[in-house]
Image (tube, grey):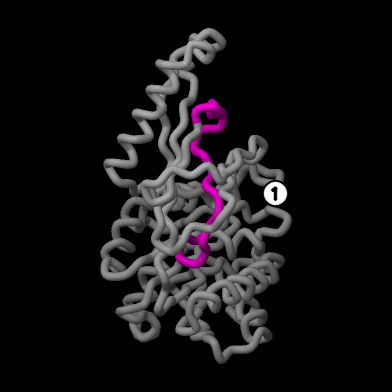
Amino acid sequence: MNKMTYFARAVLVFFAFVLCACSPDYQVRESRDVRVVVDSLVQSDKIDQLDVLVVLDTSGSMSDNYADVADGMDILRTDIESLTLDYKFGYITMDPNYLSYLGPYDASSTTIDMLMAPSLLPSTFLEEGFSSTYSFFNAPEGLAFKRQEADFLLFLISDEDEQSAITADLFYEWLHDEFQNVNHDVVTITQLEDSECGYTYDIGYKYEELANLYSKDPIDICEEDWSVWLSDSSYLTQLKDYIKLSESEPIVESIVVYVDGVDTYDWTYLEEANPVQLGFVPDHGSIVEVGYNVYVD
């Protein structure tokens, strides 16, 4: 997600240097040191086939989240159908000792089918999302579900931390090896340290670490309506018209924006949420790059 051309990076750094070094009024107002930051976003390529696997914690504390999962996946399916009709969904539990699978759900499945799916999974005790995913793709049902030419999107949804012996780093490496010939992405929904749940135990640290390895943040499972965020959380299924900056206090006057190496002025910086909002939607495969300065503490 941080891919960019050498030329574009050089242009951004040079522009920022010139802005800081050659603007007397700017220097008089601020004499502090600055550093250059470059954030980038790669739009998704067009999708021919897509497989979506939902790995769901079905322990007792998760039962009141099934409706959000169902709503979110149905919204996601609408997004996917604007890209391809050759898709399928599968659902598994997080207990590798009692691994249950439902699916596939595809373009012929009804909305009722999609809304019922999460609640049809059996209740389980273990909460091992990583090991369940690994076990599934080494079992007959998982081997049948996986299509060699299909892009792959994985959802891991739990209100507690991942509890298997597999580390986030190891799971990340396995996913890249398992899906090395296609595009893939991972979305994690879990309890965060500043969660709206209001308590500080059962934080999903391993899910957060995995999300960070994919250059994104996890979704807070206690968010009031995370079903909407769920459908907007993968670069595989969404064309974005914004890029959230990695630094919270950019020097606004220094921001420059490039799309596929060409500078554009059709954008707005929204201070409260900290994104650069574009006035258009870049095409599939486009690289959006935002360069800016921040003050050095």
Relative horizontal placement of residue 260, taking residue 217 as reference (left or right): left
Q: Is residue 161 visible?
A: yes
| Element type at mark 1 | loop
Q: Position of residue 206 (x, y in %)?
A: 45, 50
- Give the camera-side residue of 210 and 121: 210
Q: Position of residue 111 (x, y in %)?
A: 66, 84
Q: Is residue 86 above or below residue 194?
A: below
Which residue is depicted at the point 44% across and 22% down?
19
Number of numbered discs on residues: 1
Q: Is residue 100 visible?
A: no
Q: Main secondary structure of the magenta part?
A: loop
Which residue is depicted at the point 31% across and 68% down?
179
| The stretch drawn in magenta includes residue 125 | no
Q: Which residues are magenta?
A: 234-254
- Give the camera-side residue of 279 and 139: 279
Amino acid type, residue under disc 1 in the picture: Cys
| The stretch drawn in magenta includes residue 235 | yes
The image quarter in which residue 290 lies: top left
Which residue is depicted at the point 28% across and 41% down?
7
Which residue is depicted at the point 57% across and 61% down?
232
- Give the camera-side residue of 24 and 113: 24
Q: Position of residue 262 (x, y in %)?
A: 40, 46
- For mark 1, what is the residue? 197
Relative horizontal placement of residue 231, taking residue 175 as reference (left or right): right
